[in-house]
Image: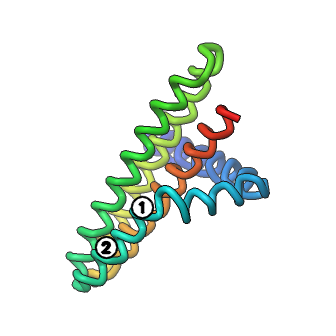
Amino acid sequence: MKKLIIIQFVVIVLLFALCSFLIFKNAQFSNNHNAIANGEYSDIDKKLQVCNAENFMTSGMNSCTNVATESWLNVIKENVFAIENTLPVSELNSFRIAQNAWLFYYQKEKDFLNTAISESDGDIHTTFAIGYIYELTKQRALMLKNYYRGLNN
């Protein structure tokens, strides 16, 4: 059972890495990604920076990052809903499979980081792990926004 879970995790990580590589190779995606990150969603990053400046202790920074991550999760939900309402029925199942695979990967990544944290000394490791989850969440949110924009062009 444990071996099967490890194999599934490795396959999902490899698929995610491959997809990420292919997407980031596309110059159009990179340009759109930067425009979105610096445009309509930049307020999430700005709020995080302000919050971190006011809460410079580890617990405060972790709380700020968790709030910002929740904001990105809301963006993901909005874009999943928008994509599902845009896709033809024939493509909807494929998107849902991809999104569920990402959610599985996301949960396993969080599980890994939580396990790694519990074995590390010092509070700063929690801040690193929460930061990694924040970036992973942000990346998916922006990717989905680009998918949605691409479907509407």
Residue under pointer 1: 133
Q: Amino acid type of disc 2? A: Thr
Where residue 48 appears, as percent x and y from the top left, is: 35, 70
The structure residue drawn at horizontal position 41% and vertical position 39%, both measured from the top left corner, is: 77
The quarter of the rendered structure image containing the C terminus is top right
**Label 2–label 1 contact, CB within 8 A:** no
Residue 145 rendering spot, x and y as whole percentages: 56, 45
Where is residue 78? Give x, y as percent.
42, 38
Towards the viewer: 127 or 82: 82
Query: Which amino acid type is marked by label 1?
Result: Ile
Res 64 quadrant in image: bottom left
Residue 59 to residue 98: above or below: below
* Colour scheme: rainbow
Residue 92 lies in what quarter of the image? top right
Report helix, strand or loop for mark 2. helix
* The quarter of the displayed image where residue 149 is located: top right
User: Which residue matches tag 2?
Assistant: 126
Q: Which residue lies furthest to the top in this view?
A: 89
Residue 7 x/y as whole percent: 56, 44
State the CA–CA distance, disc 2 to disc 1: 11 Å
Task: Say whether disc 2 or disc 1 marks the residue closer to the N-terminus.
Answer: 2
Residue at image x 68%, y 48%?
A: 19
